[in-house]
Structure formats: C-alpha cells, structure tokens
Image (cartoon, coloured by chain):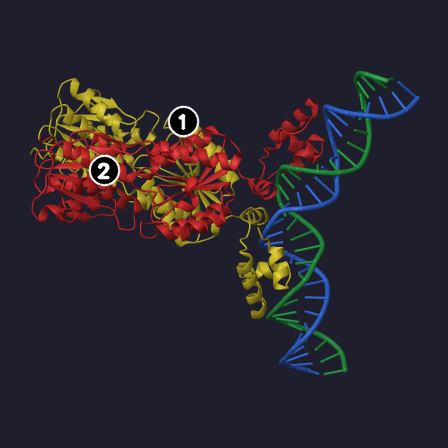
Chain colours: A yellow, B red, C blue, D green
Amino acid sequence: MATIKDVAKRAGVGVGTVSRVIAGSGPVSAEAASRVRRAIAELRFRPSHAARVLQKGQSQTIGVFVPLVHGAFYTPILHAIYTTLRTYGRHMVVDFGQTLESERQDALDGAEFLTDRGCDGLIVMGTALKPADIEHIAELQPKFVLLNRCVPRFRAQCFAPDHQAAGAAAARALWEAGHRRFAVIEGPKSSLDNQQRMRGFLGILAEHGIDPEGVPHAQGDFSPESGRTAAQALLARGRMFTALFCANDEMAIGALAGVRQAGLTVPADLSVMGYDGIDLTALTVPPLTTVLIPWRQIATHALNHLLNLCYDMSLPVERDIPAQVLWRESVARLS
Amino acid sequence: MATIKDVAKRAGVGVGTVSRVIAGSGPVSAEAASRVRRAIAELRFRPSHAARVLQKGQSQTIGVFVPLVHGAFYTPILHAIYTTLRTYGRHMVVDFGQTLESERQDALDGAEFLTDRGCDGLIVMGTALKPADIEHIAELQPKFVLLNRCVPRFRAQCFAPDHQAAGAAAARALWEAGHRRFAVIEGPKSSLDNQQRMRGFLGILAEHGIDPEGVPHAQGDFSPESGRTAAQALLARGRMFTALFCANDEMAIGALAGVRQAGLTVPADLSVMGYDGIDLTALTVPPLTTVLIPWRQIATHALNHLLNLCYDMSLPVERDIPAQVLWRESVARLS
DNA sequence: ATGACAAGTGGAAACGTTTCCACTCACAGA
DNA sequence: TCTGTGAGTGGAAACGTTTCCACTTGTCAT
C-alpha cells in the first residue's frame, strides 16, 4: 500500500503539502496540487484511517449500540440514524446485543468496543440499563446519548417517548370504542419501558373502576412467537375479554396468529392492539390498530443532539414528540 | 487517557514488558506481570485500537456489507455472522446500502469504508454487482467472500443458493398440489437472483406446456408494500389464476394483505407462495407456504471460508445446502 | 573456572498520518 | 534599497502501539 511519503516523492513535494491537498487545509499552489492529485491517482493511494485516528484523535464516526439486530423494531431506527449521518458526511459503526437478557452486559461491551474504535460519540439504546451502567458508559465516552431510557443524572442526553402517556392513550382508545373487558401481553420484566406503558394502560382502566390485578396478563419477550404463545395461553384460560393489548407490535402480530389458531377471528371475536407502529402493522391480516411511537424522529433528534456535542454543530433538537393511536381494523368498535 | 508508557513508568518496567503482558506473548516474570496488571487497573488503561492497527496491520475485524438495514431479510443473516464471529473472538463492522437501486455504488463505497477501517476481510452481499464491481472490491481487499452472488473469476469465494433449483421446486410443489393457472410477483430487474428463481419457476411450467409469456406477472421491489400493490394490480386484471408465486416472503406478506383488500380469502380463493423462509412466515394469517433457503447456514459457511482465508484457520466449509419447500396453509391442495 | 544457553528485560525503530515551525520567495510600500 | 507581509513549502515531532535486538542475569554441564 502506498503511503503519503510515496505520494510526496512521486509528486516531488513534501509530505506536508500532500496532507494539505488531501485535507484542503492551508495554502497550496495549483500546480503542486495537481501534481499531488495525479500521484495519488497513479499510486491508488488511500490514507490510512488508523494513522489518522491515532494522530487526530477523531474519526468522524458515531457508534451505535442496539440490543438486537434481528426483528423489525431496531433496524428502521438504525436506518434513520444512518441516513442522517451520511448527509453530514459522518460515518456509523454499529454494535449489537445478543439477547434481551444479556442486554446490560452487551451494552457495556458495546460501549467499550465502539469507544475503542475511536467513535467520537455514542448512541446507546436499551431499557434494562441501570444508572451504574450508564455512569460506566459516561466514563468511557462522555459524549453519548441514551435512546429509550431516561436517568436524572444525564437528563439532557436522554431521548425517550412518554410511554406512560402512550399506554394511557391506548387504553382510552379501547375504552371509547366500547371495550370493557381487557387482557394484556407484557414484555419482559427487565424492560423499563414495558413497565411504563403498562402502568399508563392499567392506570386508565383503574380510573374507570377496573382493578388492574383482575386483568388477565401473559408475558412475552417482544418476539412474534412469544406473542403467539402468550395469546394462546390467555385464551386457554377462557375468553373473558374483548380486547387484547400487546406491549409491542411484534407480539401483537404473533397474537394475531395465536388467536386464529384458537379458531377465533380478529376483530369479530376479539380485538387486538399493538404498540410502536412498525411498518408491517399496515399489512397484517387484519391490519393492526396500534400506538404509533415516532421512533425515527426521536432517534434523529437524539442524533442531532449528539452531533452538536461532538462536532460543535447547532442542529435543532426537539423532545416530546407525541405518540398517536393508529386506527385500523384489528379493533372492533362495540359501541 | 493513559498510554502504555504511563503504565510502564508506574509499574517500573519497560514498555516492551507491558506489551508482552497485555498480549501474553514472550516471557515475563510473575512479579513484573502482576505489577503491570495493577498499574493497568489503577490507570484504567485501555490500549489504543488505532495504534494497534497501525502497527500490526490487523484488526481482528471482519467487515460486512448488506444492501439494506431495514426489512426482515438481511438482519437474521447479520445476526448469524455476528454470533459466529464472537465465538472466535473476532469483531464485526457493518455497512449498509441505502436503496436497492443504489446497491452497486453503495457496495463499492461500503467496501472502501470497511477496508479503510482496517477490516481483515469482507463479506459482501448483493445481487446487482457486475463483474467489474467485484474486481474493484478484490483490488481493495483480496480477502473477501460474496454472498448471494456468483462470478466465475472468484468462484471459490462465492456462496449462493441454487435459486433456479429452488424456483423449480416451488413450481413443482404448486403443480403437484393441483394448480394449473399461475401468476408471479417478481423482484426488481437488477436482482440477478430474482431472475434465476423466476427462470427455475417458469421452466417447470414450460415443461408442463405452459407458455411463460402467458403467465401474468407484476413487479415489486422486495418490500411488503410493493407486494401488496402488485397483488392488487394482478387481481385488477381479472382473477385468471389459482396460485400466486412471489419472489420473496416480504412481498408475499404484502400480497396476503392485497388479496384480502380485494375481498378474497387465502387460500380458499387464491393460493400464495413465498420465497426465502423468513421467520415471520410462520405467523402470518394464514401461515405462508414458502421455499426455505438456508440463508443462515450459507452465511456461516461463507464466513468460515473467509476466516480460513484471513486467519489461517481450517473451519469446515460446505456449499450446496439444499433449499426445501415449507408447506403451510396459504396454498390450497386442489387435487 | 568456563562456556553455553535460556529467561527476563529495556528501549529504539517503525507503522502512516497531521501539525507546527522555520524557511524561501515575490511583491508592495516606504 | 530596504523592510514587512503573506503565500507556498519541506520536514521534524508526535500520536500509541508492537517488534526486534541487545543486554544482563542465573543455571547447568563441562
């Protein structure tokens, strides 16, 4: 591989000049510049990224950690971040967790990995992170934002939807449609955002005099398959409800399959409601009513904040983008 | 940030000794080793990845390019690669394309990006790549494997399923179930693997005396939404077929929705068949009959080959893992 | 005693950049 | 003619590792 010295020699200039041509910094005569550019082309010279990072201590790269690769939830967010980053000429390196159970350790490892790679800033997703974990991340790389997790200590760096309000909105929509008997499929206990939306949902029911303890619930792990089995388990106990609220869309999609396997039809026999608003919900059979969380926007604003932090930019940063209920066919209007 | 020199000073040894302790190479007395380890812990020393790569010319990292992030197809493959890599203590850096149309340029850019980052080897997915593109990649980084694309020049580095055989298997299954009138939803023209499976599919029909030209077909872009509109377009021309074959599962999922919107029921009125065997097909309504392509295994074997290339390992490498038809409920047996 | 050899060690050189400083011109103003 | 200025330039130093070579010790066989 050709180095900057080879280029300098071939162009008959010093290394400083070559560097200036490449970076576009400092003054270079037009004649020298063109000789350098030719030499670069002839030698197929590509600057060594490692040497650059070592020297400059900057890599123009943002590191992103997401708890899972597979599944339909995280990748659109990744895509939004990636697209934005490209428009600013920056790069992205991603690290993934393995399972939801190992999320905490994975996130810590991921933060180490990404920091070691010279990332100028970090975006960390995950709701199972304890405050101590976040302190640890902050120590590794103070320039970071948290997605879907909020801790007081780093409030300014936290970007998360109001899950409790969104859960409440779901309950209100169902109630207004005439539903009075409910069941829920929860996400994993470790997921703080799951707890929040369930609190919001059950809180509204309580306002209407329904004891949260009396609401049948099953637990899944956010995967479609877990939604299917949870729905079947719920139905096996007897059909004591008209509306089934799921903690995320993927489980709701599984629930749709589970309900069908139980010989029931959605929404004639049972209504199903999801949460998140992933694209696929528009194309299920029947199309899924869900709560649209503006994940892409939230991620973009989190990224903007991080870019401001890392590169002294002044991109607009908005918080509190509201969720909204997406009415489709999987919920019957009983009234 | 503490450097190796700081550690050496604090431990009262030379930098060489510290390096040997960290790498576990060369002889070090137990006493010196423990002093070094303590100094490392006290100073919270983390070796600079950039300096290492610069010095060693190796990064223990494999770069992966996939044409798209979002969508359900690529991420399980990514997950499989990632998991395998971790078991060998290696890392992964991913780069993504933006759209299917820009795949060629994206792949080239991706290969540059990943090579610059010091990746020891590359896995490149994408079926739109021309031989010249691949030459270009080979020049950048000779240690690479191609996933889902085959060119004679680099035969040993190519890992792809036999799409033609798999397409033929789909047609045979449909024929044996008694179907005689067909329609297809194709993928984009630029996708070579789409062409292959269609050739396989239509070839079998031709063997049974059906003129491929007479088979109604619509075109999608592999996305669910495009499958929905394609199905509707096909149906709008009149229901002249009993079985609809889709070039991938995501379009098939969309087709399911499209058929429903047209007021028809799957499989009573119309059978739908997918291709790929993504996990979600087990949970659609109705569950989707599809051709299971062993993507995870293919990816793993491609990775094994690459690891052998990069790190002188001797992992087993298998090719020609057969596809198989996954019978579910979306296809009616007419006979 | 002497030589051979291995274990253990320190530090210089090298990896390929960027940055900074010192230097040379050419030219304008006095 | 001299002086100041700024454009243009070359090259040394620095970034933080690994590797290699040279050196000191200690042990063992002769």
For the residue pair A63 and B331, the one nearer the viewer reads as: B331
Report crowding for label 1: few under 14, some 14 to 19, many 20 or more residues within 10 A (C-alpha): few
Residue B44 point in image, percent of width and height = 58, 33
Q: Secondary structure at mark 2?
A: helix
Residue at 18%, 33% in the rendered image = B173
Kind of residue at badge 1? Ser
Q: Chain of mark 2?
A: B
Kind of residue at badge 2? Ala
Callout 1 touching callout 2 (CB < 8 Å): no
In the image, B305: left or right of B270? right
**Quadrant hosting residue A263:** top left
Q: Which mark is residue B168?
A: 2
For the residue pair B46 and A169, the one nearer the viewer reads as: B46
Q: Nearer the viewer, mark 1 or mark 2?
A: 2
Residue B42 point in image, percent of width and height = 62, 30
- Residues beneath discs 1 and 2 located on the same chain: no
Report crowding for label 2: few under 14, some 14 to 19, many 20 or more residues within 10 A (C-alpha): many
Which quarter of the rendered picture does the N terminus of chain B lie within?
top right
- Residue holding disc 1: A102
Q: Chain of mark 1?
A: A
Q: Is residue D7 above or below residue B307?
A: below
Q: Is residue B48 visible?
A: yes
In the image, B265: left or right of B40? left
**Quadrant hosting residue A299:** top left
In the image, B308: left or right of B198? right
